[in-house]
Amino acid sequence: MVDFGFELSSSKRIDLDSFDSDLFLKLKAESGKITECIACGSCTSSCSAGIFTLVNFRKTILLIERGKNEEAIELIKGCMLCGKCTLVCPRGINTREIILSINQYYKKERF
Amino acid sequence: MKERIIFGYDPFVIPFTLGVIFIMLYLGTGTVRILLTLTRKEALNLLNSIFSVKIFKTFKDILFDVLLHVKIFKRNILLGYMHASIAFGWFMLIFIGHIEVILYTPQRNGVIYYPVFFRYFVMETSQTLRGAFFFFLMDLFLLIVLSGIALAIYKRFRSVRLGMKRTTRLKTGDKIALWSLWMIFPLRLIAESFTADISGGSFLTSTINTLMGSLVESTVYMDTLWWAYSCALAIFLFALPFSRYMHIPTEILLIFLRNAGIKSSSSRDGFAESEIYSCSSCGICIDACPMSVVDKKSNYTSVYLLRKLRRRKEDSLFVAEQCLMCGKCVELCPVEIDSCRLKLLKKRENFPDQIFDYNYLSKKHPEFKSGINRPDREKVLYYAGCMTHLTPQIYTSLFNIMDKAQIDYSFMDRDGSICCGRPLILSGGERAAKELIKANSELILRANAGILLLSCPICFKVFKENYSLNGIKVMHHSQYINLLIKEGKIKLKKGDFSVVYHDPCDLGRGSDVYSEPREVISSAAVLKESSNLPAESICCGGSLASRRFSQSERESVTLHSLEKLNINNPEKLITACPLCLRSFSKFNKRETLDIAQLAEQQMI
Amino acid sequence: MEGDVLVIGGGAAGMETASRISDFNRNVILIEKEQELGGHILKWDRLFPDGIPASDVTKNLKESLGSTKVLLGCYITSIEKREDSNFFAQLNSGETIKCSSVIFATGFKLFPAQKKQEYGYGLYERVITNADLETRFKKGEGLGKDAPKRIGFVHCVGSRDEKICNNQCSKLCCITAVKQAIELKQLYPFAEIFCFYMDLRMYGRGYEDLYLEAQSKYEIRFIRGRVSEISQEQSGLVIVKAEDTLASRPLKITLDWVVLMAGIISERENDYLSQQLSLQLGEDGFIDSVDPIQKTNQTNIAGVFVTGSASGPKTLPEVINEARSTALSVNEYLNKIKNG
């Protein structure tokens, strides 16, 4: 097969054939509800940090599920942990716990 | 009085003596170790508190808490009697024992075992006034201790009778210490009874001696019993450091440290250590804890957290993260251990500070529509906080009240808040919260207000404790409405319906605001009692502090709390916290209102 | 009073079932707690997807009731099934009804929108529900004489929401919102109309066409995101916050009016009846069928049937069809017990 030089830069597409599912599986084990998101956006919409930053919980867990962990962390680190998203989530996802878990995970990974 | 044994020694004293030496060394080392961890300032504070009038308070606390257990008496008389009889009775037995030695055998003063085995070594008849007096006292206190032990044994099997639905599960060390403690006093009774015909005795020991008849004549039995008594004591003393009874000596040190104003700054520093070892595992916190309604969660109550911290278990963090931080266990703890603080410290040590990034707060301030930049000085600055934005009925009512009272106010975060920082603090992010506190402080100070008005008790607590706002008065809306009533700016008419008031954790226990909300409610409706005392109100289940509560587990907590609140069948439930309002109105079949809504409805 | 069949509830389901059973020359008693037959559609103006007036439907249903005995303003205070498999129902009027079969046509309840506190229904004047809007249409009021500039529809209010204890999809609101949005646009051609949805469930014939028409002809804008908060400006206008999930950005919009699409929830007021008969309810509070495919209108108690929205959200045509099939099942049952 001819390689069209895609190796020059890493692919931006979501690759469900090979991706890093480590964090997602860990979060799933800790709080099974993470898979129950219906992407309604209530969390992002109610987010106190959302008006100043890119904080977006809905997209964070979506990206983690798709293996794009590095992009995901950027969408969560401005979170003030106020807990509003947990209060509005129609699926009862323990969003605040998951945010803390993600950050704990990165603390271990990076520091 | 006359010594029976010339050398004042018998081999049976060896186990006991070894036990005492062991425990003395252990306690000595432990105390020194804890004292060494104190900072210079703390050590000075400690010295100051010892060599000043404060020492009397310390002595009083020791007498009331360690010996008489006044706090447990308040909880349940039988349970209090059980603790006081054993602790105080035992103390008196030792104390009088020493007096006897000093009075009658001064040459033996300082011999460790003498006061304890006095009856074995010294003969006296109860005919003399001195003998009769001391024998009577000793028998009396022994009886008191024995009655306490009997209650303790009864409690093991029927704890409900002593006001406790659940008691702690015991570990091996606890069990050994417990059994030996149970054995000590019956053995002492029988041992002293066997020698009562020789050494004298009073109403207990002499009577038993007479009843035993010919049995007492054999010295073999007598020696065996004194050996058994000494061994029971020794086992107890050796097991002490590995059991919950360690709280007896540690609590004294804790009282000294606490009265010196020392606080822990890590979950395993000296003060923390003295708290951890002062936990008596009494289990009062298990029944008190709102988590306990969810069966498996009672394993995460404070008593078990302290146990895990003591054993340096890795999962103590996991346990700390369960807690709803309602503070009820701290309120009820007979030893006053601030377990919530220990949990916070534990979480703080593991908080991912490095990941959170609040640079955006310092770079750019959000523009607030409501004119906080207006030049005219406004009296009241209202901050809804994150949660109250989800319960607009609270601030709508509050604004209507303020309009009626013609108050000049502005709404600081109409278009969204910077969080107050307490949710971060509750998760261990004290350092991270500083940036939020700084950003909010700037906004508030720029507004030139006299009063910062809050609806959310979570915000209220942190604004009071962690912000320095240049003398701006921080008020919760329940206090402010009460103030408006007192100043005659609004008038309420008393409705004929009945209500019950739920004390939000951070407002009641957390900030000691109990009376103002009740005054407001009493002028608007008939206030009924719930089944809990105000300081023992049960968390609504909505607490932000716990990371480990699932929604369904929170619901169990809410339902339990509601059941207790509605015990006297009130028509409405009143609360003063947006989180409580949301948690309760989800399930309460009765109308659930915020105090501001009630006041607005009854306003004339 | 004696009869073969007692039908509880005089809405579309109850009326249609009663008339069809009467067709079999059965003695039917229909009780309705309100003073008028019709149920929820009494409040409705026009019906989706074609805009037929609701009053026409009610009128036709009433006319075909035949020999059915109708008791208005009546509800059951207690009911029991005796050993001879007859039912005895005590009414609030003091009357006792003896019958061989009972049909629950008790319908549904619209979600009380004030329970979704962050939407401020009852607090803000310009936040109304789908039912309020229909009442306004019926009265010819619309949204007032001053043409509103911007109107928002909030889907899934009280549906698919664990936080207010209703997990089910109400099924009818998506299409109702599209219908009402079009009606408003017809009324106020210059108004901008926004629908905030999570998923648009346009499952019925003609629904997708209506959606397409809403997009193309009426230029109604659909924003994918659930509204999280509504607040009020001092002017009375309302500010809606949601995430535009397709753009991944939080969104804020100031609107003249907000219409909340209150969902369909179970009529919990009848739980005492289901308890007395030991009827099996689902977690959502709707009555469970004994078999969800072939015996949808039979319950776990022989002789007790369920029809219409009492067993879950249904559209009107579905209700009417089900009512007819219920009539067949009930007739079969009555034949069976008569022949032993």
Image: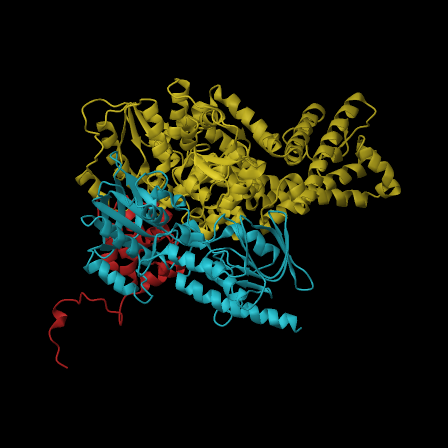
Chain colours: A red, B yellow, C cyan
Across and down, in percent, residue B98 comes to 66, 28
Q: Quarter of the image holding residue B325?
A: top left
Tell me which residue sits at (16%, 67%) in the image. Answer: A10
Across and down, in percent, residue B455 comes to 36, 33
Q: Quadrant of the N terminus of chain B?
A: top right
Tell me which residue sits at (39%, 38%) in the image. Answer: B578
Side of C136 relative to B549 (left or right): left
Q: Quadrant of the C terminus of chain B?
A: top left
Across and down, in percent, residue A52 comes to 21, 44
Tell me which residue sits at (40%, 60%) in the image. Answer: A32
Q: Is residue B34 above or below residue B309?
A: above
Side of B488 relative to C82 (left or right): left
- Residue A47 is at least partly visible in this image: no
Camera-nearest residue between A8 and B517: B517
Tell me which residue sits at (31%, 61%) in the image. Answer: C49
Please tell me how many numbered marks the rendered image carries.
0
Camera-nearest residue between B344 and A14: A14
